[in-house]
Amino acid sequence: MARHARYDRKTALEKAVCLFWEKGYHGSSMKQIEQALDMRPGSIYATFGNKDGLFSEALAAYAEQGGRELAVHLKGFDSIVEGLQDYLRAIAYSCSAENTAPSRACMIVKTLLESSNTHPALAAQANSILAAIEQSITELLEQASARGELVQSVDCGRLARLLQAQIMGLRVMGERKLDPQTIRDLGDDMAAILDDFRTRH
Amino acid sequence: MARHARYDRKTALEKAVCLFWEKGYHGSSMKQIEQALDMRPGSIYATFGNKDGLFSEALAAYAEQGGRELAVHLKGFDSIVEGLQDYLRAIAYSCSAENTAPSRACMIVKTLLESSNTHPALAAQANSILAAIEQSITELLEQASARGELVQSVDCGRLARLLQAQIMGLRVMGERKLDPQTIRDLGDDMAAILDDFRTRH
DNA sequence: CTCCTTTTTGAACGATTGCTCAATTGCGCC
DNA sequence: GGCGCAATTGAGCAATCGTTCAAAAAGGAG
């Protein structure tokens, strides 16, 4: 053996997520990255290859954490649909609160919009993550449907995309920094959309 | 008098809109701008000040055109609400068609997300445009309400923001380049949301 | 044609970009 | 304590960034 690695890959990635989420790919220079990670260029390139590689890993880490947060959130609810409704309200709440998060908008959406016509590899990654999220929501809704939470005519994939679009729209509106109550009302209104698809008890 | 201006400011701006809408602010270099406008740096700087000034004017031109398109669209409908519903479907249709447009996502949203933590002046401009759009939709809904198209309990400002968020979400989803029919279904589902707020005849 | 004004040109600037690599540092092992 | 490996350093690379400005070009007036 020889010298120990001074940097923990995971914590370095967390810091990279923070910077990239806040400023985007083009908006984050290597100089800023060096400062944020407290690493010198050589170490960064030895660990992550190049800026693209670092961004790609950061985006994947962001998506994974987002997935975990949704799963944790849903565990607090017996009803899947009610869990999803409250998830929308929770997003609205986090958008309205004084927030230490790097940004209110979704990093995946920011990446998609920034890279779709300038950086095909990143755009493809963002697209595949969004497709995976759509698929997860679809499966959740299919579970809900099997449990009788949804009216029988519901097309779960289609509703999943409607829900995904709500999340996107809500988080973009969050970036506008409207009144807290205004954003929370928007979250409530979006949650209410799902009521149309629920079965009445 | 002396030499004529070889470039028409308006057509130059149209070309700038195309480039910036497609690639964003950071993604468009001055070299690309020179090529797109067929102008040399000196002329560009003499006409628009600098890159920021050009982008700012392009964004304003984009917003103005978008506003005109909405107004034209609504003229085809007796009912304001039906016009708005069809507007959502039209967006979905344009997102699904083989498209010559620079991007499917909204340039204002792209600008907001790209600049919110890197370029405060641009973010402020995008924010004020979005606020103006919200206001326009609010006024449209208030007209509709006065005409008895909406149930009386509707908060028009709140519904306007819900509608604005739909448009944002729809156009981000458009950037994912899903099946044409899938996007059109999403547009239909969003249009159907408005049915909940309409009066029955 | 000659001036005069205005527009256009494009070489070139300093700053910054992403990135490299020879030199240095620090730890474990014999 | 000195050797050797691996991680870290940071000066510096070529390329590109946004921008400038002196010179050239082009039309109208006399």
Image (cartoon, coloured by chain):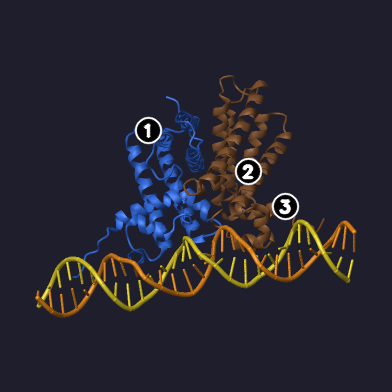
Chain colours: A blue, B brown, C yellow, D orange
Q: CA distance from mark 3 to mark 2?
A: 29 Å
Q: Image quadrant for the N terminus of chain A?
A: bottom left
N-terminal label among 3 and 2: 3
Nearer mark to the viewer, of 2 and 1: 2
The structure residue drawn at horizontal position 59% and vertical position 47%, both measured from the top left corner, is B107
Instruction: Tell me the residue that label 3 is attached to.
Output: B9
Is residue D2 depicted above or below B197 in this figure?
A: below
- Asked whether the residues under marks 3 and 2 belong to the same chain, the reply is yes
Tag 3 near tag 2, CB within 8 Å: no
Q: Nearer the viewer, residue B88 or C19?
A: C19
Q: Chain of mark 1?
A: A
Tag 3 near tag 1, CB within 8 Å: no
Amino acid type at image mark 3:
Arg
Nearer mark to the viewer, of 3 and 2: 3
Instruction: Tell me the residue that label 2 is attached to.
Output: B91
Quarter where residue B131 is shown: top right
Residue B99 appears anywhere in the view: no
Q: Chain of mark 2?
A: B
Instruction: Tell me the residue that label 1 is attached to.
Output: A79
Quarter where residue B78 is shown: top right
Label 3: few (<14), some or many (≥20) within 10 Å? Answer: few
Q: Position of residue B64 (x, y in %)?
A: 67, 42
Q: Position of residue B171 (x, y in %)?
A: 57, 45
Residue B62 appears anywhere in the view: yes
Amino acid type at image mark 1:
Ser
Q: CA distance from mark 3 to mark 1?
A: 58 Å
Quarter where residue B124 is shown: top right
Q: CA distance from mark 2 to mark 1?
A: 34 Å
Tag 2 near tag 1, CB within 8 Å: no
Q: Position of residue D1 (x, y in %)?
A: 9, 76
The structure residue drawn at horizontal position 61% and vertical position 35%, both measured from the top left corner, is B132
